[in-house]
Every structure is written in structure tokens, then in C-alpha cells.
Amino acid sequence: MQFEGFNSQDFNTFTIDGLDERMRAIQERIQPKFQEIGRKAAADLSVKLGNEIFLHIARHARRTVNPPKDTWLALAANKRGYKQHPHFQIGLFDDHVFIWLAYIYELPHKKEIAETFLKNMQTLKTTIPNDFVISLDHMKKGAVSLKEIDLENSLARFRDVKKAEFLVGRHIEADDAILADGKAFMQVVESTFDTLLPLYQLSIKQLEHC
């Protein structure tokens, strides 16, 4: 099957009360779409990187009371998990889709990766377009554009603060027509990941020395 796009019902999933009820909607409405998106994105990344990339879909298994405010798929070079590895993410909050290259707090060598990015600051500034956004906490909806953020301070915080994170990519608002066009959306995903591949490869190269 081919991904045909997101719709208002997908975003309305996050207004459903109750953990079980919202999880059922995520599983029925969104996760099949994640399978379609992730299968293609993983195959594309595997070819470009020269090694297999695996699809992981968030299960929210640790939740016992509060329903999730967002959901996502992750693409990583590890079959067993993604949180302890540099990875790509695609997911939804109630008002936007996010497309990330993600380094979250579970990453064991995030200090070394942060140092590598700080030493290659000019590469980051020339690689990341001004309209891309950066988040320092994947649990929060907000993000700041590259032209508005102090990138060096953000990376220093990522290095020095245990719970700090670094995510870079795109936000697409829920009412953007491109989300309803599956082919166009997949082109945006591919373009976003292609732009971020040099950063991903820089971090992977660093991890080889850790």
C-alpha cells in the first residue's frame, strides 16, 4: 500500500479522552500510515547510508493513566531499539507533523556527539536551512527556527545537561495541504532526511570512536 496522506481525524485522535480509547484510535488510524511511511523511508535511508535502517513504531507501553499527546515512528540502524541511537523520527501532535533527526537523552554518548557538532559549527550552519526548526525536548510541542536560536548555546546545553536533547528538522502545520497528499509529503520527508544526512553521518562517525 502507498501512503495517501494525513487527515483531520488523525489529528483529532489527540482529543479523545481515556488512555485505552486514544491508544485504540492511534493503533487504528495512525499506525497503519506509519507502517507505509516507515517502510519506504527505511528502504530509502538504507540505500543512501549503505547499511540497514529499521522501522520502530512507538507503542507507548509504559503509559498506565495519561493518554499520549503525540505519537511517532523512528528509523534507526539498530533492530532492537532507537532511543540509545541517533535516529530519524516522523510523528504527530494535535496541531502539526514533525520530521526530525533526533538525539534524545537516552543516548549514551551524547556528550561526544555534542562536542563533535560544536567543533563543526560551520558545517551545521551551512547544512541546516534557516526554515528548519530545533527542539531541545522531544516531549514539548514547541520548536525554534535556526535563525532564531543560539545554536552554540543549545549544543552546549545538550552536552552539559543530562536530560537535554537535540532534535532538528521540520514542522508542518496540521492544516497544510501537503499533508493530505501522500506523494508530496513523502517527497518532503526524503528532502528533509537528505538535508540532515551529513549531520547524522558526522555523529555516527564520532560514535565509531567511542
Image: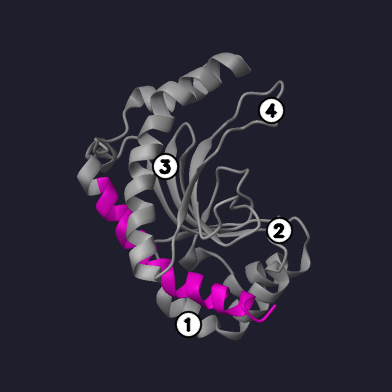
Label at residue 60: none
The kind of residue tagged 2 is Ala
* Callout 2: SS: loop
> Mark 1 vs mark 2: which is more N-terminal?
1
Q: Residue at x 36, y 34 (%)?
A: 33
Q: Which residue is mark 4?
A: 63
Q: Please state the extent of the stretch shown in magenta in the rendering.
A: 185-210
The kind of residue tagged 4 is Arg
Q: Residues within 10 Å of mark 3 (few under 14, many from 20)?
A: many
> Mark 2 vs mark 3: which is more N-terminal?
3
> Mark 3 vs mark 4: which is more N-terminal?
4
Nearer to us in this view, 37 or 199: 37
As measured in the structure, the alpha-carbon distance from the residue carrying label 1 to the one carrying label 2 is: 22 Å
Q: Which residue is mark 3?
A: 97
Q: Which residue is mark 2?
A: 164
Q: Residue at x 71, y 23 (%)?
A: 64
From what the image shows, is residue 104 above or below residue 124? above
Q: Residue at x 27, y 46 (%)?
A: 185
* Callout 4: SS: loop
Residue 54, horizontal then vertical, whole percent: 47, 52
Q: Quadrant of the N terminus?
A: top left
> Mark 4 vs mark 2: which is more N-terminal?
4
Which of labels 3 and 4 is toward the front?
4
Asked if disc 1 and disc 2 are in contact, CB closer than 8 Å, the reply is: no
Q: Does the magenta segment cover residue 87?
A: no
* Callout 3: SS: strand
